[in-house]
Image (spheres, rainbow, N blue to C red):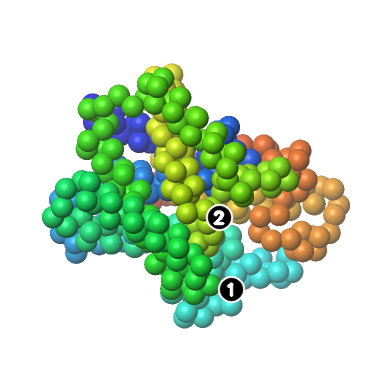
């Protein structure tokens, strides 16, 4: 049973990172459930599903620092050096000006101090959110009380978004919003997963109807925007008090539903397994791969690289035709980058 649970978690991680990469290419992998309506909180939910409360706070801190922050620090060092090396070639410095604040504080406040690894903003936030959750979990209260407290925190976070220009408030509101979904992951794993059947036609129908009404009523959606129901947690941008929480829950549910339905059919797909085991490396490297694709197209079409430097890090070449090339190549290359790094780590540790 534990092996099946681990495999389903890995499949859920694979789905989550595919949704993230699709979101950065501005298309929805799951119809009706746009990526920016749930993609980040799905990772918080997964963290809650695998949360283990047996360690002391200090021991938990050490473990999470090793698994989350150490790879992050190494990636920051590598990408800052790469950014310096690329600047003369592309005519643009894809990072904030290096300083003590930008390299040591900004990872926790925005995580966008280096453009090429800006998707990794999530890692320091997850690290901090898990530490706060560890402290919160010591509260002696029943599940309903804990849920109501964290639900209030999520609503309060949305209210705080009015003051998100202050980066310290931005960090606080992201933390407050994330705690609810870490707790929901814990609650699902301990109280629902093996005890209640939520993947039935009635529940699925309710979720689909709710999502349909969310699309209808959410003022964010305009046909020219391409993605409705979106909120941008990294910058604390919310358009509604209720929709972000509701659409996060519906997005998490449909992700769990898809894993439950398709697991028997895809459990032996080795490459899908590799995607789930390399989510960190996919998140860290896909923008680099995307930009290599873009510059390669510019080179073969004899276009000056200066045209590319006029856009931001998410500017892609003719996305109407190339989106899915970016998506497939980005995922495949990043998976093998992750596999190569793990191979090198094993060789290094064996010596």
Left or right: 133 as drawn, with respect to 142: right
Residue at 35%, 36% (x, y): give it. 9
Residue at 34%, 56% (x, y): give it. 152
Instruction: Report x, y in % for residue 311.
Output: 74, 61
Other-residue count near label 2 (Cα within 10 Å), few / some / many at <14 / 14–19 / ≥20: some
Residue at 41%, 20% (x, y): give it. 201
As rendered, which of 305 and 345 lies closer to the eye? 305
Question: What secondary structure is marked by label 2?
Answer: loop
**Residue farthest toward the right in the current orientation of the protein:** 302
Question: What secondary structure is marked by label 1?
Answer: loop
Does the image show residue 3? Answer: no
Instruction: Report x, y in % for residue 71.
Output: 40, 58
Label 2 near label 1: C-beta < 8 Å?
Answer: no
Other-residue count near label 1 (Cα within 10 Å), few / some / many at <14 / 14–19 / ≥20: some
Does the image show residue 95? Answer: yes
Residue that label 2 marks = 239
**Residue farthest toward the bottom in the current orientation of the protein:** 100
96 lies above or below 137: below
Left or right: 9 as drawn, with respect to 334: left
Kindly report which numbered mark, 1 or 2, lies closer to the viewer in this rendering: 2
C-alpha gap between disc 1 and disc 2: 28 Å
Instruction: Report x, y in % for residue 192.
Output: 26, 33
Q: Which mark is residue 96?
A: 1
Total tally of numbered discs in the picture:
2
Residue at 39%, 26% (x, y): give it. 203
């Amino acid at each position: 049973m534990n092996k099946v649970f681990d495999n389903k978690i890995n499949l859920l991680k694979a789905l989550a990172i595919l949704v993230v990469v699709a979101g950065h290419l501005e298309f929805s992998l799951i119809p009706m459930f746009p990526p920016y309506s749930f993609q980040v909180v799905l990772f918080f939910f997964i963290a809650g599903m695998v949360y283990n409360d047996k360690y002391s706070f200090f021991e938990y801190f050490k473990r999470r620092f090793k698994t989350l922050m150490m790879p992050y620090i190494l990636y920051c060092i590598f990408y800052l050096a790469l950014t310096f090396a690329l600047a003369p070639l592309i005519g643009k410095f894809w990072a904030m000006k290096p300083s003590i604040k930008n390299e040591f504080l900004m990872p926790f406040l925005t995580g966008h101090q280096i453009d090429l690894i800006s998707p990794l903003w999530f890692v320091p936030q997850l690290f901090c959110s898990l530490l706060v959750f560890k402290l919160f979990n010591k509260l002696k209260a029943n599940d309903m009380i804990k849920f109501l407290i964290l639900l209030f925190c999520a609503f309060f976070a949305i209210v705080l978004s009015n003051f998100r220009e202050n980066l310290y408030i931005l960090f606080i509101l992201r933390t407050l919003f994330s705690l609810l979904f870490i707790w929901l992951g814990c609650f699902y794993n301990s109280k629902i997963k093996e005890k209640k059947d939520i993947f039935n036609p009635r529940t699925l129908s309710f979720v689909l109807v709710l999502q349909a009404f969310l699309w209808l009523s959410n003022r964010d959606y305009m046909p020219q925007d391409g993605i409705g129901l979106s909120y941008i947690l990294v910058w604390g941008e919310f358009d509604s008090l209720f929709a972000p929480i509701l659409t996060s829950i519906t997005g998490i549910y449909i992700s769990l539903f898809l894993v439950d339905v398709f697991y028997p059919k895809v459990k032996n797909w080795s490459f899908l397994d590799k995607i789930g085991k390399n989510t960190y490396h996919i998140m860290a490297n896909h923008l680099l791969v995307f930009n290599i694709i873009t510059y390669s197209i510019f080179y073969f079409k004899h276009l000056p690289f200066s045209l590319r430097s006029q856009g931001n890090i998410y500017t892609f070449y003719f996305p109407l035709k190339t989106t899915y090339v970016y998506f497939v190549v980005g995922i495949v290359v990043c998976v093998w980058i992750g596999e190569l790094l793990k191979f090198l780590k094993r060789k290094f540790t064996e010596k």
